[in-house]
């Protein structure tokens, strides 16, 4: 039976040659065509991305989910607990809410880039994902999209956090604390910190969706996911 061709944007002759080589067939266990592997992985990628964005990119998507909720970092989180005795707890709560609302506002921007990453899937990527661990999809997305998503998230996060009075004070205090080794350097700026944590939460959620697919591919109701991941 003639195998279906594996088509990806920008595939080179070298990749095409590898795709139809004995090594590639062996990597897929000799039981899946490149076309099935491609379609199954792309379906898993798309489902994970859409589900994660939908869950996090809504009100309380971060704030009410303890797995991804963004707290003040390290020393500042501990110090903030003392502020309730000085009548400043409300302002701290407002800052934490603003941080998480910023992440919720930024996440929908990820959908288009994530889906573009699905379209650019290569033969080698598909093989790695099919035969990879429980978070191979997540690792693929992180490699392909973390840098450009960070650029898209940052201005949204900046707009959301600068409305809160404590944001500037956070940067001032965190900057000094960083110099003393009490706060990580990358956490010393609230906008950068929230952007990074928003991305961490997004990829974590994609990973959770991927684990669901791998654990129960039949339960997804998708024939191709059952065929590719139910092996």
Image (cartoon, rainbow, N blue to C red):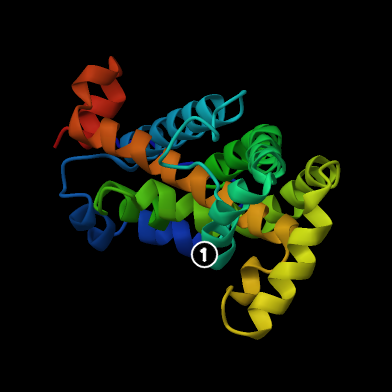
Which image quarter is the C terminus in? top left
Q: Is residue 111 visible?
A: yes
The relative height of residue 47 versus residue 19 in the rendered view (above or below) is: above
Q: Position of residue 148 (x, y in %)?
A: 70, 55
Q: How many marks?
A: 1
The relative height of residue 60 versus residue 150 in the rendered view (above or below) is: above
Q: Is residue 220 left or right of residue 111?
A: left
Q: Position of residue 35 (x, y in %)?
A: 36, 37
Query: Which residue is at 29% across, 28% downward?
Result: 225
Q: Is residue 86 left or right of residue 69?
A: right
Query: Which residue is at 51% across, 64% downward?
Result: 74
Which image quarter is the N terminus in? top left
Q: Which residue is mark 1?
A: 74
Q: Is residue 46 left or right of residue 219?
A: right
Residue 23 found in image quarter: bottom left
Query: Which residue is at 54% across, 67% downward?
Result: 75
Q: Is residue 21 left or right of residue 150?
A: left
Query: Which residue is at 80% across, 40% downward?
Result: 160
């Amino acid at each position: 039976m003639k195998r279906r061709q594996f088509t990806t944007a920008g595939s080179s002759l070298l990749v095409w040659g590898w795709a139809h080589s004995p090594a590639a067939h062996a990597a897929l266990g000799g039981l899946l065509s490149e076309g099935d592997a491609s379609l199954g992985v792309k379906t898993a990628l798309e489902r994970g991305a859409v589900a994660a964005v939908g869950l996090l990119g809504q009100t309380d998507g971060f704030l009410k989910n303890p797995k991804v909720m963004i707290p003040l970092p390290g020393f500042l989180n501990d110090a903030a607990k003392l502020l309730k005795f000085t009548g400043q707890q409300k302002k701290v709560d407002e800052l934490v809410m603003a941080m998480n609302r910023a992440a919720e506002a930024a996440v929908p921007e990820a959908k288009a880039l994530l889906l573009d990453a699905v379209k650019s899937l290569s033969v080698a990527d598909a093989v790695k994902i099919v035969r990879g661990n429980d978070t191979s999809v997540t690792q693929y997305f992180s490699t392909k999209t973390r840098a450009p998503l960070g650029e898209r998230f940052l201005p949204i996060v900046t707009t959301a956090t600068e409305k809160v009075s404590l944001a500037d004070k956070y940067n001032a205090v965190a900057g000094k604390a960083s110099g003393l080794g009490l706060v990580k350097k990358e956490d010393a700026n609230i906008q950068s910190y929230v952007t990074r944590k928003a991305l961490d939460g997004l990829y974590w959620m994609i990973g959770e969706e991927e684990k669901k697919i791998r654990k129960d591919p039949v339960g997804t109701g998708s024939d191709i996911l059952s065929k590719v991941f139910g092996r």
